[in-house]
Amino acid sequence: MRASERAYWALREDIVEWRLPPGTVLGEVEQAARLGVSRTPLREALSRLSAEGLTAAHTGRGVVVADVSLENVIELFELRTALECQAAALAAKRGEPENFRLLQHQFLAAAEAMRDSLPDARSYYDLVGRLDAAVDTAAANTYLYQAMSNLRVHLVRIRRLARDNPARLLASATEHANIAGAIAAGDSQVAAAATRIHLHQSLEHFKTVDPNHRSPMPAERTVS
């Protein structure tokens, strides 16, 4: 792997996982030494991250990790709604019903388990990831997949800001079951509508988080 590629993936993971929080100055000398690369490949990596919106130039401070504001989140959800509703609609037309019927049952089982005990968010997000992958495959649209892949980098980062809320996680599981069920039924309009409802509820939940206490939570305790 080229040095610039290695630096890019290392910095990207550190930013997404909040090891480098918003506002962190990414000094070339310090970061190059930390990552074991020269300054030229580091600049290439920072350029790629800036193009993705994960870093930004800051007057007098060089390059810093980009902030995550409520305005940022709203804009991301606007794009997410357009992309994910279309992906769900396509999946309903092109996907294998049995795959999504199984996912529907798994989400319903997860919701039932959450009613009896505290949710295991890590396992839940593994299940969400399987639904995302199934929708990507079923939609069978290369450009849509690429756009969603770029967007999900920011979504993972945003999840770290959401407070642990078992009630929201339970509602989210039910919403995902509805999406999977609509796709399994081959109903593109209902699949898109169920996706829109889920995203609206997720955004509204994020808005309830106290802006003075929007700090990252451990990966296994995030909710979205």
Image (spheres, rainbow, N blue to C red):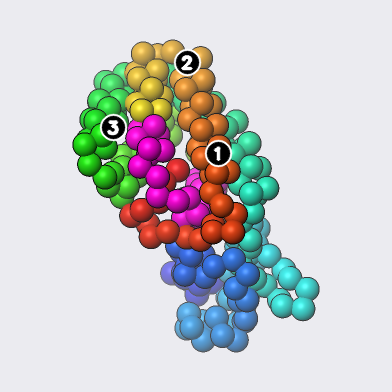
Which of these two is toward me, 77 or 117? 117
Residue at x 64% of width, y 54% of height: 69
Q: Secondary structure at mark 2?
A: helix
Residue 26 shows up from this direction: yes
Q: Marks 2 and 3: which is nearer the front?
A: 3
Residue 111 circle label: 3
Q: Report the magenta stretch's main SS.
A: helix
Residue labelled with disc 1: 203
Which amino acid is tagged 2?
Val
Dot 1 crowding, Cα within 10 Å, few <14, some 14–19, many 20+: some
Which stretch did the figure color magenta? 148-173
Q: Earlier in the sequence, mark 2 or mark 1?
A: 2
Q: Marks 2 and 1: which is nearer the front?
A: 1
**Within the magenta stretch, is there residue 147?**
no
Drawn side of residue 133 relative to residue 111, left or right? right
Drawn side of residue 73 relative to residue 91, left or right? right
Q: Earlier in the sequence, mark 3 or mark 1?
A: 3
Mark 2 and mark 1: Cα distance apart in space:
20 Å
Residue labelled with disc 2: 190
Mark 3 and mark 1: Cα distance apart in space:
20 Å
